[in-house]
Image: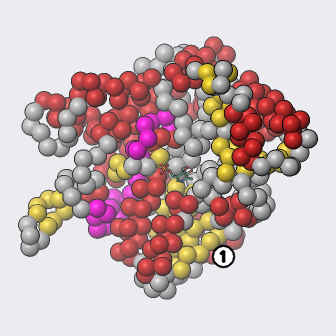
Amino acid sequence: MLKTAARSSGRTASDIRSVRDDFPILQRQVRGKPLVYLDNAATSQKPSQVIETLSRYYRSQNANIHRGVYYLSERATADYEAARVRAQRFLNAAQPEEVVFVRGATEAINLVVGSYGRSVLRSGDEVLISAMEHHSNIVPWQILCEAVGARLRVAPIDRAGTLPVDEFERALSPRTKIVAVVHVSNSLGTINPVKQLVSLAKESGAVVLVDGAQAAPHMQVDVQQLGCDFYTVSGHKMYAPTGIGLLYGRGELLEAMPPYQGGGEMIRSVAFEKTTYAPPPAKFEAGTPHIAGALGLGAAIEYIEQIGWGFIHEREASLLEHALERLATVPGLRFVGSARERASVVSFVMDGIHAHDIGTIVDQEGVAIRTGHHCTQPVMDFFRVPATARASFAFYNTLDEVDVLVRALQEAREVFG
Ligand code: PLP
């Protein structure tokens, strides 16, 4: 249970202190300074509620699922399936069977590419992605397109780092069989108008995958309202363990899709002559899954629900506003990406200082930010920068932490002149 009063309205500064107490790692020091963790888009920190769920599972509940007729196995199975139901409600999927546990957003996309994509895409067909995709939503499609002779088309972005809808619409054609688009950009923070994009893509007859890796931690996702066919979630970016994520797939598509991997648990019956497959989601969960991870993801969802979207939005909006305002005061700092609709992610470069040096300097002050291309090299090419520094905030960050980053950047400015 949440130790904080964050559930009630009219939250105060003391709420954030008790929320931070839920995250043991936030109490530690690095390099003799309090940790300022601003790399939440890479992976978020984990609350005790999630850590304790993992510990409890391994200490007193560990058993394989869907197999045993004994108490522990039945309990583990029930808890694993309960986590699926929690995930279903979290995404507002119509059925728990529409939610497949996967390793993360990357595996979710590869599953769709390898199963749905491989079974429908033919030579001359097109897959449409956007110019702000994470490599995970580029490379698998590239591999598939090369294999079948299909074309990968890219809807352009503009200098603000947004995706102009008219250009997206122009890139759609009757040949577009699949559209795969990111909900929130990990390197620019841009929130795409996915409902509108999905509706345009569907009108043109395409099946749509939305990469929600960076959206699910920041906003309430409703897959039915978005109207998408597939939606991917990365557990470790939303306070859950690494190695667990979700693929939402529309029921009739999952039913019709061939398996992604073969092995135990995904079959109905096996004979050397012919094997038949289990219905979804089991069809797509070959082998022993990350049971503890699924339970941990269930605990993370419960945690988010108890914290409440209102609190999350309010905190993250004020962190973003403060960061944009304060960072703008650092001489020679230039933002990369300036979408109006954006999540709490800020990318920037500084005149005369390579992004990696920025990261190393602020690390001396205990500040963890990400530097590099953020697995979006085409975005870096578009903005003609080799890399950016990126600060990404979670609801447990504080305005003081933003100020620590800004002071460290000012010091970097003095060092580099
Ligand atoms: N898509 C986006 C937009 C991401 O930011 C990331 C991770 O950074 C991924 C996909 C890959 O997610 P995962 O680590 O769960 O495979």
Name the element at disc 1: helix
Q: Is residue 397 left or right of residue 291?
A: right
Give the image location of residue 138, x and y in percent. Answer: 54, 65
Q: Residue at x 47, y 19 (%)?
A: 2
Residue 268 is left or right of residue 148, and the answer is left
**Residue at mark 1:** 170
* Residue for point 77% across, 49% down: 354
Q: Is residue 304 above or below residue 385?
A: above
Residue drawn at x 23%, y 28% is: 61
Position of residue 62 in the picture relative to residue 112 (left or right): left
Residue 99 % position (x, y): 35, 50
The relative height of residue 8 versus residue 178 in the rendered view (above or below) is above
Residue 241 in the magenta stretch? The answer is yes
Residue 28, horizontal then vertical, whole percent: 58, 21
Residue 93, relative to residue 327: is it above or below? below
Quarter placement of the N terminus: top left
> What's drawn in magenta, residue-wise?
238-261
Kind of residue at badge 1: Arg
Q: Is residue 249 magenta?
A: yes
